Structure formats: structure tokens, C-alpha cells
Image (cartoon, coloured by chain):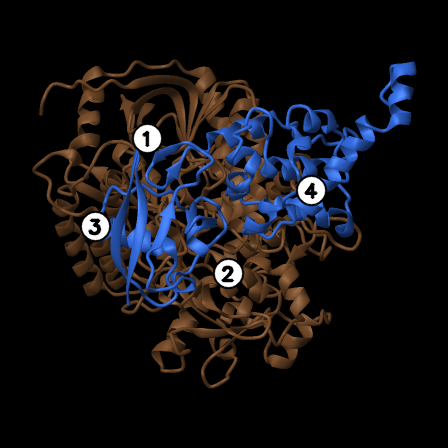
Chain colours: A blue, B brown
Amino acid sequence: MKRKILVQRGENSDFFMHEFEIKGDEGMVVLDAIHQIQANDAPDLAVRWNCKAGKCGSCSAEINGKPKLMCMTRLSDYDPSEPIIVQPMKTFPIVKDLVSDVSWNYEINKKIMPYQHPSNENDPIMFQKDIDRVQEFRKCIECFLCQDVCHVLRTHDMKPEFAGPRFMIRNAGLEMHPLDQGNRLEAIQKEHGIGLCNITKCCTFVCPENIAITDNAIIPMKERVVDEYYDPLKWIWKKITGKSN
Amino acid sequence: MGVLTEDFETRKYDVLVIGAGGAGIRAAIAASDEGVTVGLVSKSLLGKAHTVMAEGGAAAALGNADERDNWKVHFRDTIKGGKHLNNWEMAKIHAEESPKRLMELEKWGAVFDRTEDGKIDQRNFGGHRYPRLAHVGDRTGLEIIRTVQDQVVHQKNVDILMECTVAKLLTSNDRIIGALAYHRNNGKIAVIQAKSVVIATGGIGKAYRVTSNSWEYTGDGHALAYEAGADLQDMEFVQFHPTGMVWPPSVRGTLVTEGVRGEGGILLNNKEERFMFNYIPKTFAAETAKDEDEANAWLEGKEGAMRPPELLTRDVVAKAIMEEVNEGRGSPHGGAFLDIANRREADYIKKKLPSMYHQFKELGDLDITKERMEVGPTTHYMMGGIKVDARTSASTLKGMYAAGEAAAGLHGANRLGGNSLSDLLVFGNIAGRSAANFAMKNEMLPHNKTTIEESINQILECFHEDKKENPYQIHSELQDIMEMHVGIVREEKILDNGIKKLEELKHKVMNTKAIGGRAYNPSWHLCLDLQNMLTTSLAVAKAARERNESRGGHTRLDYPDYDPDLGKINIIIRKGPDGPNIIKSTKSKMPTDLKEFVEKEAL
């Protein structure tokens, strides 16, 4: 079956929509369509991808305006009489065509205090019930779709003030690790700006790994920050003694 | 060719690591720990390399799930699974060191699934005598790459070059002195000076059509090393994983983890027969269940019951499925049925195999907790690769090291599932350390200006007006040749024909055309990748033509049995003035005590 695909192309702020016709096959995903276009019509069409199985988080894009992985989005989910519109993620600068520059995310990750293992602990003993939540966050494939959809980053472009949902779960995964010795609450509040999230849950809705980003990571972290910095009794205690606890 | 006006960037590192999957990142960490400067070059973004797709687990004889396990049994399983072609010393080092390398990951923040008493849980897998695979559901590779990734970004003196491809290795007087690379995002050339180099570029699967591998697996490291004069070894041994998706067409080849069988999944043909009972090799009979009752008793954990035949090594299972299909007993889309729905509760399946559940639901409209999957063989892994020294991971080219899938020896003729993730940790570490030591003892050598200019011209040649061929079309032709002539079963005449076709394809490959500019241009990248795929494919085909026996991943219709003499030999491919030379190299002998231990029938 023939299908129309409308792909955003171009670089250096010179962008245009390019219409292609492809031959649809059973079970085909949007990434297959893009590959077919490369092979037949536009060899230089830029797209970033790796595993084509929803495991690496490379092929993030906006399909009919919705942030999605191209490899996990079936053509059959869309009305065949309408063209499918494929665009790069809007929150990041465009390198070319469907490829965006996501390097900012790697810079943010570098600033997060890594896991701090207890010095006396040799072979870690942890119980499954205590790590289920941490493992939920560690499912993250770094597709950055949550960063793309987050209005603090997307609409208000507050990258210097807000690390975004991906790094809230990274922080939460470390803070909730049963053996971790680090304390990241000050950084989560000040550098990573958790207060800027007003829990619209857009990130949770687009997560291809179904991580409950807002409910399980951001809200509990907000609570910890509030407990630490906005508890009036704690505040008075700190003023008097100069100690944090 | 005109005067070179290319404005290239120059970089200098003690150690250059090419490839940022598990092996490359682990090597970079090890080299940096030794105190040298490191450049880590990645074709993709960091964390997206093939390691991320590994599902089932990492093999290490921790003895958490069964205390009878120890390194010696792991060693024995690896040798038996590799059909005795392994480099025994590598197999020994691997079995001894993998527990330590794995435990280290938890100190860096990894969080594996637990046993009741809070230790790392271990699951059953093909060819492993005891439950041995540390895992996180079926996303173990993600856990491992994310852990080493978060570790390496905090290491001292490590520069990470993302989306950067090495196109040529530079040598001087039979020693490595650096590499030439291009940045994918803007097409700029980088000339990198290095005292030593670690190749950790992974596999070659993209030379085949039905494969579980991503676009990155174009045999870059194999081809770069070959061109630079290093020896390649065991190139005839390509692993066809028995269970890839077969339907719908767009996902044909996508991996279905062996973990499904490890968790109790069974294989059936269209006559509802559990056919694997008909394919048990003599050497594995003593440790395989004789009938379904015994196999079911094993699943329930009954002592003394032997393992089900679905957990035989991958080479055996892949060939069995192929034979069932050829005999007309296959599933509707040309595979076998894989059933976990009738073996485990839905909640258990979703907890232990979440990404398989997700993958079939989203891409195949199928609920694996209710229905059977259809599966068939898919090109998965390269056992062969750069010949290395077991203790140092040194290649035959001075200053160059190799680790992970790009290196040869550990897995012999067939790799056991789970031995890849442990391989890359153990030998990534060794290679990184050795490369650092070499760098500390040797000088940085200057590059030759003319060679650099010539090399840059070669990289840019496919932009010339007179080039004609569409690289995507040629890639497709290459895949057809490899599927048809150098696939799961091989035969002299078919191989000869394949080699001829590959040689004829060469001028087309050299005539492929890049369209458009230098920035993020996949047509240009593919033109260059194709040269690597062709070099590697020829090495695979020629080695396969040379090995007149069937062993592990290499099956010859005209030589269906083992040849004991060939079992003592590795086939080496080395660049000569007129193309690849084939050299037969005698393997080093395993010490008697280990040999006797391996040959004991059942433990």
C-alpha cells in the first residue's frame, strides 16, 4: 500500500517539508519508511538510529507532532489517507533533517554526583523490594523524549535553570539507592531546579519505557527537598546551630 | 586529484580507544586508571552501542543461585560450547576474572536482580551447567553500558568523541601511530596521534540481511586492523542466534532473548512436537534431559533432573530450527514456535522478560503471556576477529590491542549466551591496561604528511562526480551474497561462487556515490562502511572455504563432521600484496589437568 510521508529537512535554520511516497508493508514502522526513502529517494536524509527495537533510544522524533521513537511507531496506527508528518525533536538544536543536537543532556549528566559506594561494603547485599523503584528508573534508555516534551525546556527554554525529567529520575535513582552515600538534595533544588516542574506529567505520558517519572521520581524528590529546606522547625534549628541536621 | 585544501583538526592521546560499547568504555576506564590520557571514539552517541541491546545477562561463576558453580565449570562450559576451538588461556582468564569484574559494577552503581538473600540473582542459559547469568530482567546490556558510561565520564583525562568514525589506522614501521576519523555531524576530518590503540568496534552483522545487529556493525575494526597488517583469526565462525523474530517482515531478525528459554520457554514445530529432543548431540547427552518429564522436573527445580534440550548451545538449536523448517514442519512464517505462555504465569513473564513482552506487543501484535511466538535464526555475533594474546590482548601489530566482539579466541567455534557481556568487561579491562602500559614505555611517533593527505583524499573520494553506484543498492547486493553463499549451511561450490561474486562486487563498492554535503550524510558514511563490510565478508567467505569440517557456527554440507586435525588449527587471514593470504596456525595445547576436567562426561 502506498503511503505519503512528510519529512522535515534542512540544516542551519533553512528548513522545509519534503513529501515522499513509500510502499507500505505489513508491520512497518516509521523508521522503516525513513530507510526506504534513504535507499530510493534521498540518500543523504539524516536520521539517527541504532537498535530498531526500542532499546537504545536513538531514533526519537516528533510524529504528527507527538514525541515518539520512530522504531516503535507503526504506520498502521495512522489514517492511510493522510500523510504522516515526521520532524526532529523541537527542544534541541537541529544538526540536519531529523537529527538533533542532544549534547546538552550529556553535559547535565556529567554534573550529577555519581553513585557513592560505602567504603566498608564489599559484596553489596540488597533486597529486591528495596531496589524495585531504582530499577524502574534505570530502565531509562535516554531517548530524551521527556526532555523534548517538557514545557519548562520546550516552551520556556530554561535549560540553564532546569535539568529536565530525565535527570530528575537519574537523581532519584541515586537518592533512592539503598547503599548510596551521596546527598544530592541541594543540587536537585538549586542547580537542577526541581521546583520549576509543575507536575503536568507530560514526560510520563511520552516515556516509551513507561517509567512513572512524575509520580515515582519527581514528586518524592520534591517532598524530600521540601522536608530538607522548607521545614520550619529544621530551618530554626539550622539557624541556631548552623548544622544541617 | 587536486591539491588538498582540507582543514583538519589534530588530536593527541596516549591511548586511543576505538568503539564505545562495553569493551571500549571498560578499556578507557582501565587506561585512565593507569594515569594516561585517553581518547574514546564512538560511532554513535554514548550509551547507544550494541551492548545496550544485550538482553539475557552476563555470565560469571558467582555461585549465588547454585553453590556448586565455580570458575572451572564455567571454563569447561565455555570450551565445550566453543567446540574446543577456543584459546584455552583466554577462556581460563575469562572464567576466573568475570566474577570480580561483575561485582565491581555494583560498586559503580549497577543494580542487578536479587536472590532471596540479597545477592545477585543468576539465571539459566544455553550451555551453562548451572544458573550463571547475572541479569536485570531482559535489559542487562542497558544496565552494564549505563554503569560504565556513568563511570567513564568522571574518569580523569578521558576525552569522549561522540558520533565520530575512524576511517583509517596509521602505522609506521609496523607500529600503530594513530588514526584518521571524521565527525559525523559536520563531516570534519580529525587526525589523531596516539601511542597505542584499542580496537573495540564490535561485529559484522550488517553484512547479512537477517540480523539482530544495528547499522554500526559493519566490521570496521576487523577491516581497519586487516588493512593495517594485523592478523584476523577464526573468521569463518559467525553465530546465528536461533531465536530472532520472523514476523512481521519489518522486524525479521530482531533478537528474542535466550532468556525466554532460560526461564522455561519451549520450542515446538507445527506438529506440536517438542522437536529439540531429536537433536541432542552425543557430547551433551549426559547433561540433557531425556524426555519431557525430566525437562519439566528440571524447571520445577528437582535435584538430579537434567536441563531441557532447548538450552543446548546456539549452534545446535539454530540448525535444528532450520531443519524443521526445511522438512515442512515450520511455523506459518518459516520459523518455529516458542512458547512461554503455557510455562509461566503472566506476571512472572512480565517481570522477567519485560522488553520481550513489550517488543512483541508493539511490533508483532502478539501477547507473549497468552500466545506463542514465531522465531527463526538470525545473524548475531562474530566469534572470529583480531588475533590477540590471551594475557595482554595485544594484536600482531605493535601497539594495537583488541577486546570484545572485535577480538578472536575466547569463544572458539560458538559463543555461549552471557559470555559476551563478561568478555567485554574482562578483556576490555586487560586491553585498556596493556595499551596504557605500552603508551608509558613508548614515544609518540610523528605522522607523515603525504600519507595523511592521501588518506583524506580516499575518504572523500566517493563525493567525486564520476562515481555512479547507489550505496544502499550495493549494500543490499552484498547482503544477498552473504545470505545465499556464506549463511548457516555452506558448501565448497556455493562458497567459491560467493567469493567470486564478492570480488566482482568490489569495483561497484569502490564506485559508490555520496550525494549531498558533508554534514550528517548517511550516504557518505555507507560508502565507507561498505568497504569495511566487503573486506570482512571476503575474510569470512575465504576462511569458511578453507575449513573443511563442521564445527560450532560453521556448518559445511560437504564436510558434515568434526575433523580432529582441524580442531587443532586456527585459520588466519593476513593481508598480502595480492589480497588476503590464508595461514593455518596451530593452537597452543591445554594443560593436561584442565583437559581431563573438560573431558569428564557429566559433572
**Which residue has dot 2 on it?**
B359
- Left/right placement of residue A184 relative to residue A202 reads right
The answer for how far apart the CA atoms under marks 4 and 3 are is: 44 Å
Frontmost of labels 2 and 3 is 3
Q: Which chain letter matches label 3?
A: A
Is residue B308 or residue A24 the one in the foreground?
A24
The answer for how far apart the CA atoms under marks 4 and 1 are is: 36 Å
Instruction: Please give the name of the residue rendered at 31% of the width and 23% of the height, measured from the top-left corner.
Output: B190
Q: Which chain letter matches label 1?
A: A
Amino acid tagged 4? Ala
**Which residue has dot 1 on it?**
A13
Amino acid tagged 2? Gln
Amino acid tagged 1? Ser
Local packing at callout 3 (Cα closer than 10 Å; few below 14, some 14-19, many 20+) is few
Local packing at callout 1 (Cα closer than 10 Å; few below 14, some 14-19, many 20+) is few
Is residue B460 or residue A227 the one in the foreground?
A227
Q: Is disc 3 on the same chain as disc 1?
A: yes
